[in-house]
Amino acid sequence: MKRKMIHVVIWTLAILLSLGACASEKKMLKKQRSEALRDLGEAYLAQQEYTRALREFLKAENVYPDDPYLQNDLGVAFMAKGNLELSVKHFKKALDLKPDYAPARNNLGSAYLELENWDAAIECFEAVKDDLLYGTPHYPMSNLGFIYFKLGDHRKAEYYYKEALDLAPKFPKAHHGLGQVYLARGEYDEAVSSLEKAVAQAPGEARLYLDLGEAYKKAGQCNKAHDIFKKAAALAEDDKIRAEAEAAARNAWQK
């Protein structure tokens, strides 16, 4: 009788293990299929085909939703499509699945920044900048500079932009931000110096030329200001920036 019971237990365990193996195999197949769809979505994302990317990411989520990298990709795609609330939702889910996922936390901070939820954005960027494994800490540093500039704290803004430049001396975003801080404080020579560096590192950005022209004008270099405003107008793809640059060129010698 005991021997028969042992056989029954062994037989039952064998069935359970078999079912477990089948379930594990099915989960693995789902994960692999989801990853293939995610890879395709990331290819579309790299080509800035955001609708196609989002379509593939949503298919992948239907197959296997518990992938933090997929949830981060969904957040990026929704942010590119202008749906910041959904991007926040997916970045948070990525972090629920992988709390140490620094790129997702930085992306969450960027979404909060776009929403002008300054406190939440600061919390994210502060956490990322202190993560020793995060490869590009100058990005959250620069974002912190931008936030504090928006909040009117020019001292902190300057500090974070300079911290970013200590890490990445050729980072145009930080040079640009620092130039805006100097412009706001009336330190026009310093503004010119920072904005010239920004333009040298990102020569195709019309907005940088526009701000540099403003710095030249404030510094009394009106001829240079006119030429730079014309350059901004020639580079601008956005009609609003082009019109602003053309108006600034016409008024370059006016106080």
Image: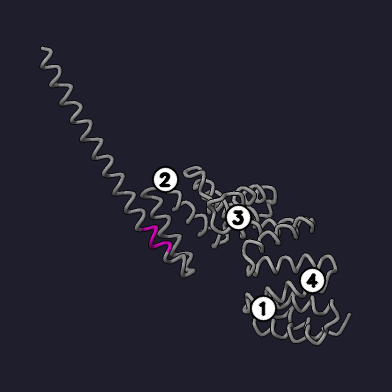
Measured Cα–Cα span from mark 4 to mark 3: 31 Å
Dot 4 crowding, Cα within 10 Å, few <14, some 14–19, many 20+: some
Question: Which class describes the residues within 10 Å of circle 2: few (<14), some (14-19), or many (20+)?
Answer: some
Residue 111's disc number = 3
- Earlier along the polypeptide chain: callout 1 or callout 4? 4
For the record, the magenta segment spans 37-42
Q: Which mark is residue 239?
A: 1
Query: Which one is in front, 140 or 110?
Result: 140
Element type where label 1 sits in the image: helix
Which residue is found at the position 60% from the left and 55% from the top?
111
Tell me where residue 77 appears, x and y as whole percent.
50, 60
Q: Are marks 2 and 3 in contact (CB under 8 Å)?
A: no
> What element does badge 2 sit on?
loop
Q: Earlier in the sequence, mark 4 or mark 3?
A: 3
Q: Which residue is mark 2?
A: 66
Residue name at image x 18 percent, y 22 percent: 9
Label 4: which residue?
190
**In the structure shown, which secondary structural element does the residue marked by tag 3 occupy?**
helix
- The CA distance from mark 1 to mark 2 is 43 Å
Query: Where on the picture, by quarter, is residue 135?
Result: bottom right
Magenta region includes residue 39: yes
Query: At 78% from the left edge and 81% from the top edge, which residue is drawn?
Result: 248
* Location of residue 227 in the rendering, given as x and y in whole percent from the top left corner: 75, 87
Q: Is residue 252 above or below residue 176?
A: below
Quadrant in the picture for the N terminus: top left
Q: Are marks 1 and 3 in contact (CB under 8 Å)?
A: no
Q: Amino acid at mark 2?
A: Asp
Dividing the picture into quarters, in which one does residue 207 lie?
Answer: bottom right
| Mark 3 Cα shell of 10 Å, populated few (<14), some (14-19), many (≥20) | many
Could you tell whether 219 is left or right of 47 in the image? right
